[in-house]
Image: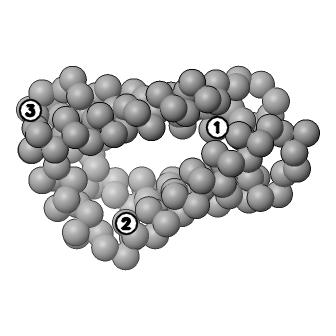
Amino acid sequence: MSPITRFLSRLLGLYCILVGLAMVTHRQAVVETVMALVHNAPLMYVLGVITLIAGLAMVLGHNVWSGGVLPVIVTVIGWLTLIKGLLFLFLSSHAAVDFFLGSLQYEHLFYVYAAISIIFGVYLTYGGFRSRSR
């Protein structure tokens, strides 16, 4: 496994675990923050720029579609981050509210999203620390 895959799987894995646990322990604050965010166009723009940079960095640095499950998951997360950044940049405030709070049912499925984050985090962290360099 390449060093960049190991690094990104560790980084993304630990990030997902920590964010997922913070979501579970501070549910109301996280829901209120997301609701305030999607109603604030300037914040959506700034978050979109930051997320776009992170997504582009991952896609340009790690666009690997073979070599096992771990590299592919890291690549998919990079592409999803890039797409999320574009959505933050280009969705109107009304469309963002409809998509993030309506279509994705963020508040209703909150614990599902937290669990997905923690599960992916554990898998990525375990895979990143277990693997060896080529």
Seen in the image, is 59 located left or right of residue 88?
A: right
Label 2 secondary element: helix
- The reply to whether callout 2 and callout 3 are in contact (CB within 8 Å) is no
Residue at 58 percent of width and 61 percent of height: 14
List the residue tagged with mark 1. 73
Whether residue 13 appears in this view of the structure is yes
- Percent x, y of residue 74: 63, 38
Please report whichever mark, 2 or 3, sits nearer to the chain's N-terminal start: 2
In this rendering, is residue 1 above or below 56?
A: below
The residue at the point 28 percent across, 28 percent down is 87
Q: Amino acid at mark 3?
A: His
Q: Earlier in the sequence, mark 1 or mark 2?
A: 2
Q: Is residue 56 left or right of residue 66?
A: left
Q: Quadrant of residue 26?
A: bottom left
Colour pattern of the rendering: one colour
- Name the spot of residue 109 as percent of width and height, x first: 34, 53
Q: Does 76 appear above or below 133?
A: above
Mark number, residue 23? 2
Q: Is residue 7 left or right of residue 131?
A: left
Q: Which residue is identified by label 3?
A: 94
Question: Where is 70 relative to 20, above or below?
Answer: above
* Mark 3 nearby-residue class (10 Å; few <14, some 14–19, many ≥20): few
- Kind of residue sitting beneath label 2: Met
SS label for mark 3: helix
Q: Determine the residue positioned at 77% across, 42% down.
A: 3
In this picture, residue 82 sits left or right of residue 75: left
Q: Residue at x 28, y 50 (%)?
A: 106
The first of marks 1 and 3 along the sequence is 1
